[in-house]
Image (cartoon, coloured by chain):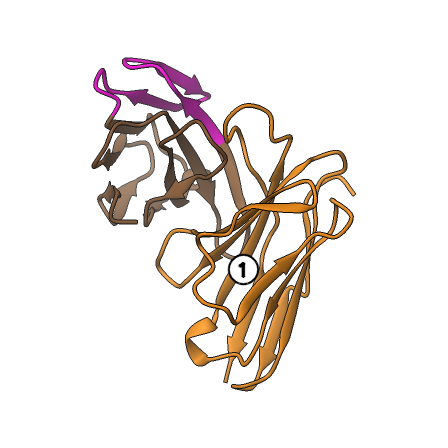
């Protein structure tokens, strides 16, 4: 596709359940980023991939959060034992990963609601 | 992020008026980015500033980075309803691969 695609666009789940959020970056982009945006706040950095490896996962809030990018393209953010505080919009972005952050191309986000 | 402060938090202006949004960093920036976000959508890149004193323009939006590379301002001339949205500044502190965002400024333009 032409842009970053995220699925699902909306996810409602119950406290304690497991959730997966998917990101399909722009073709050819080696760098992929996950951010979390709570209501009224700016995006909060979670994790960054360069190719298949997580180059910086310092933003993951705890060990319930995990992300993978097994083939260096699509990435999945996995949240175990969801809590109400996990409710937010999860944004994915990608870029060429060449020399510094550069312009990030964002998807429209996956809105997660934990009841 | 507490490293990056944006002001004002929100702004209501009459169509046709000029406005300025500020972004202040607690430490020296390697690069500063401005993005715009409409409700329910992802962020759209506006411009990137790297050099002290640098100024860039895109249509009616101008952004400037101060000489000390710790403060940036975004100025909109003759605002239009299409300018409404959330303006976010993003900081790159290391020339690496992480952008830290401010909380955003919510702009409303009254027709």
- Whether residue A77 is situated above or below residue B90 in the rendered picture: below
Please indicate whether residue A35 sits to the left or right of residue A78 in the image: left
What element does badge 1 sit on?
strand
The stretch in magenta equals: B46-69
| Residue B88: x %, y % from top left | 38, 42
Residue in the picture at 58% in, 63% down: A66
A64 relative to B57 in the view: left or right: right
Q: Residue at x 46, y 39 (%)?
A: B98
User: With respect to residue B5, does A82 lie above or below?
Assistant: below
Q: Nearer the viewer, residue A55 or A93?
A: A55
Label 1: which residue? A90
- The quadrant of the image that shows the C terminus of chain B is top left
- Residue shown at the point (60%, 31%) measured from the top left: A97
Question: Does residue A17 appear to the left or right of B73 in the view shown?
Answer: right
Q: Tell me residue B57's x, y (percent).
A: 41, 18
Q: Which chain is orange?
A: A
Q: How many marks?
A: 1
- Above or below residue B15? Residue B78 is above
- The shade of chain B is brown
Position above or below: B60 against A84: above
Q: Position of residue A41 (x, y in %)?
A: 35, 56
Which of the pair B8/B101 is nearer the observer?
B101
Which residue is pictured at 34% across the width and 27% down the height? B78
Callout 1 environment at 10 Å: few (<14), some (14 to 19), or many (20+)?
many
Membership of A12 in magenta stretch: no
Residue A69 drawn at (x, y percent):
70, 52
Task: Out of A75 and A50, give the one closest to the viewer.
Answer: A50
């Amino acid at each position: 596709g032409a842009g970053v695609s995220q699925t699902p666009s909306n996810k409602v789940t119950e406290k304690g359940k497991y959730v997966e959020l998917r990101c399909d970056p722009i073709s050819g982009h080696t760098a992929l980023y996950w951010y979390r945006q709570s209501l009224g706040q700016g995006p909060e950095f979670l994790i960054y991939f360069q190719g298949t490896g997580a180059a910086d996962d310092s933003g993951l809030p705890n060990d319930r959060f995990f992300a993978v990018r097994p083939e260096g393209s699509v990435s999945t953010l996995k949240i175990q034992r969801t809590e109400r505080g996990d409710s937010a919009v999860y944004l994915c972005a990608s870029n060429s990963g060449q020399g510094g952050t550069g312009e990030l191309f964002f998807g429209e986000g996956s809105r997660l609601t934990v009841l | 992020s507490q490293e990056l402060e944006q002001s004002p938090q929100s702004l209501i202006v009459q169509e046709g008026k000029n406005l300025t949004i500020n972004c202040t960093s607690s430490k020296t920036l390697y690069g500063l980015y401005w993005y715009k976000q409409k409700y329910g959508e992802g962020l759209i890149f506006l411009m990137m500033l790297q050099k002290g004193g640098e100024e860039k323009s895109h249509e009616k939006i101008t952004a400037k980075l101060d000489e000390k590379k710790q403060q940036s301002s975004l100025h909109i001339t003759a605002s239009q309803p299409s300018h409404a949205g959330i303006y976010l500044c993003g900081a790159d502190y290391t020339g690496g691969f992480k952008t830290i965002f401010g909380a955003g400024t919510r702009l409303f333009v009254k027709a």
